[in-house]
Image: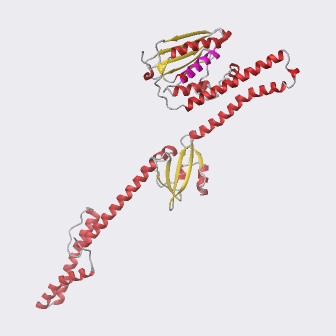
Amino acid sequence: MVERLSWKKLVRELAFFYLPWVILGLIFGYMPWFLLAASWILLGWHCHHQLKMSHWLWTDRSLTPPSGSGSWEPLFNGIYRLQQRNRRRRRELATLIRRFRNGAESLPDAVVVFRSEGNIVWCTKLAQQLLGLRWPEDAGQPVSNLLRSPDFVRYLARQDFEDPLEITSPLNYDRTLELRIMRYTEGEYLMVVRDISQLKQLEGMRRNFFANVSHELRTPMTVLQGYLEMSRDPDMLIGPMWEKAHGVMTEQLTRMNSLVEQLLTLSKIEAAPHLDLEDKVNVPAMLDVLEKEAISLSGDKDQVFEFEVDEGLQVLGDADQLRSAISNLVYNAVKHTPPKCKVTVRWFLSSKGPRLEVTDTGSGIEPQHIHRLTERFYRVDKARSRETGGSGLGLAIVKHALSHHDSFLEIESVVGEGSTFSFTLPQRLTAKAA
């Protein structure tokens, strides 16, 4: 084991080195010349080891120190130990930084670290996707130059980060981002960015939902309130007037009852847990009942119904949800098909799985409305929907019921010719014949 260099060891080494030269000087004389020669030899020896050290540190850079003798051996080994300690600390620091970055990358929010003057230190991959940053190209760039939102620039200059800031995504104007900035280390800040577009959309849907429900209920309630106020004067509701008032009130109550039932059905379907889809559903029997109900609903419109049903095709699923989906499609076709026109319902096994198609010969739907038909309370023609008793919830019920069966609603329509509403259940939901 090599000991560290001490002054005692250094004095002892010098004494042993000069002693032979002093003895030679005493024997032969010329003491100064012998001491001068010894000093030159010692100087050359030190210069040789200095060159070895310089070569090791700047050129060789190997882990193993060069061999040395005398006082240079503990110096070489001391520097070697110092290098080992520094390497170990760098590895520990690199591991710590890697863990921090891996942890930040696994967060559902984007993270950006920047200095107090605004220069970016580091950012996660999600920050690059949400904010359009590039790493490591943007390292050292002022974050205010890359996020040019005026609100963000003012927010950054104000240095008051107690409340979060909402800005529009620089990459997609339909997305809303929430920024939170907090002190990270001395002279550095940590910015956390979250995509709240879906939350904003849900808030908007909630506001629209309550506004629509209030609007749908206000009309029949206003009608009922008006007739109830008229009933205070018995002379106002005599003879034909009472029959008209009774009919209108009954119609409005039926409308409110239908709206409440559809809201409850939609709420029940949305809140339903994950379905096992193991119960056998007799869709042909269901369609047989719906055909009779459709004829009854048609009344005196004298519509033509054609049901093409594969009587042996049954599926696995939730009977209530499938009935809600299929019945809404059939009832909508009846309501929007003119008198003496045809409604076709087909239930068959396609190459992809059990398929239902409901085709009407109504006025059709313009393309710009099709992608919004499954929104709650969305109606193409509000006046016509109120005349037919529509609430705008039927296709929303269909959408959620089908999603629980790993399917979706397909809509094809030609203005002036009619529409086809269809869906295909997965092949695995085909019930095996008994």
Q: Main secondary structure of the magenta part?
A: helix
15 in relation to 95, above or below: below
Q: Is residue 387 left or right of residue 293?
A: right
Q: Which residues are magenta?
A: 321-337
Which of 382 and 392 lies nearest the eye of the viewer?
A: 392
Q: Is residue 242 left or right of residue 24?
A: right
Residue 257 on the magenta span = no
The number of numbered discs placed on residues in the rendered structure image is 0
The structure residue drawn at horizontal position 43% and vertical position 21%, both measured from the top left corner, is: 427
422 in relation to 186, above or below: above
Which of 175 and 286 lies nearest the eye of the viewer?
A: 286
Q: Is residue 131 left or right of residue 365?
A: left
Which of 274 and 356 lies nearest the eye of the viewer?
A: 274
The structure residue drawn at horizontal position 70% and vertical position 22%, both measured from the top left corner, is: 254
Residue 332 on the magenta span = yes
Q: Quadrant of residue 344?
A: top right
Q: Position of residue 228 (x, y in %)?
A: 81, 26
Identify the colour scheme used.
secondary structure
23 in relation to 105, above or below: below
Question: Which quadrant, please, contains the N terminus?
Answer: bottom left
Q: Position of residue 422 (x, y in %)?
A: 53, 19
